Structures are given as structure tokens and as C-alpha cells.
Amino acid sequence: MSEPLPDERPQRRREYSGPASTLGLAALVIAVVGLGLWWFEFRDDPSAGTAHTAGGLGVIALPEDRNPTGQPPAAREGRAAPNFRLAALDGQPRALDEFRGRYVLLNFWASWCGPCRAETPDLQDFYSRNLDRNIVVVGVNQQEDAVTARQFTAQFGVTYPILLDTSGAVSQAYATGVGGLPRTYLIGPDGVIQRVYIGRITFDQLRELEAALP
């Protein structure tokens, strides 16, 4: 009885497939990287196109004569704040551009967010103390319905404007390179972002801002 011959396949060397295969893999990698860079660049400019809008709500274009920076709007210090239009709790749409000429403390929040709940009384106190000054607090609820947002505002006695970002498009535009909640942006009367607060904005930070306002 003859013994089975050993399987020579494991010892075979993998044949070189030639330069075409290597170049093809390199081209694929370059294409993927290029696509990723293009996507992030497009995301950095929410005013480009209308992909972020639905039913007239969401990120909208900022007119060139309302942009003093000469650069595309972006959610970072020194750039014009991305313009948007969202429904308020009363159902009426409001645009960020409507507040031009005033300082805007733009706060992104959600009812499930612990730090958001912790900072809301301080934001309301700041808003109430500065009603006669050139600043307004604007809250943007992230992807919750109007009932949930109303319950939250009633619980904390919120009287500053609350807008509903039900699709999440505006929150996504302002989360470029940041992410997480809460996020707060101090926007100057010229529409340019002066400061970005990541995480809970504190009582001391609000007092510091209050003292610095003209």
C-alpha cells in the first residue's frame, strides 16, 4: 500500500502578479483618500449647495454681503457662522441671520444630555440678567420632537428662543471637528464666531462673558 504524497501547495511560493496589481492598489488608496478629503472639505462649507436643507429648513446660504471674512462659513473661531433656518417652538421658522447686529450665544442641547441639563439654569439666568443688553441666547434642540423640547423648557423655566433641529443637519454642520453635546458658540454682531465652548458652559464663563460685553 503506497503512502499518500505530501501536499506541495503550502510550500509553493505565491506568484508575483506584476506591477499592474501594485499600481492598481495604490490608485485605489489614493482615490479613497481623495474622496475623504473632498467630503470633509464639503462638510466644512455648509453653505455649498442645498443638500442640508429640507422644506426650507436646515443650513441655508449666507449672502456674500453678510460675510465679512471672505471665507466660506464654518463653525470655528474667526469664521462666519453657518446660516440656518429652523422652526421655533411656536412653529414659526427663524433664521440665524435675523439676529445680526446682536451678540448671539448659540447653544446646542438635548434633553437626554446631562451637562446640557446642568448648564440650562445658568444660561437662563444669564439671559434674564441681560435682557436690556445687546445679546441673546438661542437654544438649538438636537433631533427631538417639540413635545420633548417644551417639557424641558417648562421644567427649567427657559424663556430664550428655542429652535428645533429635527433632522440634525444644523447640529452636524456645527459639529465639524468637535462632536458631542453641549456646544456653545459666541457669535459677534457681524456674524463671526468669536469663541467656541466645548462641553458645559460654566457659571464663571458666563460671568466672564457678561463682564466683557460692551
Image (cartoon, rainbow, N blue to C red):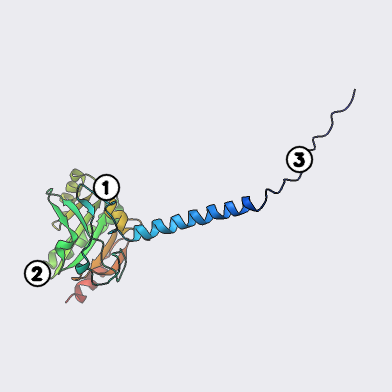
Query: Which of the 4 image quarters holds residue 205?
Result: bottom left
How crowded pointer 3 is (Cα within 10 Å; few <14, some 14-19, many 20+) is rated as: few
Q: Position of residue 60 (x, y in %)?
A: 23, 56
**Residue 167, image x, y percentages:** 26, 47
Q: Quadrant of the C terminus?
A: bottom left
Q: Secondary structure at mark 3?
A: helix
Kind of residue sitting beneath label 2: Asp
State the residue position of label 3.
10
Q: Using residue 28 as the reference point, say whether residue 178 is left or right of it.
A: left
Q: Residue at x 13, y 68 (%)?
A: 130
Q: Give the foreground label among 2 and 3.
A: 3
Which residue in the structure is indicated by mark 2?
132
N-term-proximal mark, 2 vs 3: 3
**Mark 1 element type:** loop
Secondary element at image label 2? loop
Q: As shown in the figure, which amino acid type bears the numbered disc 3?
A: Pro
Question: Is 148 above or below relative to 125?
Answer: above
Judge by depth and name the residue closer to the eye, 22 or 209: 22
Residue that numbered label 1 is attached to: 167
Q: Nearer the viewer, residue 66 or 93?
A: 66
Label 2 to label 3: alpha-carbon separation: 82 Å
Q: Nearer the viewer, mark 3 or mark 1?
A: 3
Q: CA distance from mark 3 to mark 1?
A: 55 Å
User: Of callouts 2 and 1, which one flags the residue occurring earlier in the amino acid sequence?
Assistant: 2
Q: Amino acid at mark 1?
A: Ser
The quarter of the picture where the N terminus appears is top right
> What is the spatial separation of the Cα atoms under label 2 and label 1, in whole angstroms?
33 Å
Tell us which disc is closer to us: 2 or 1: 1
> Of the residues under marks 3 and 1, which one precedes in the sequence?
3
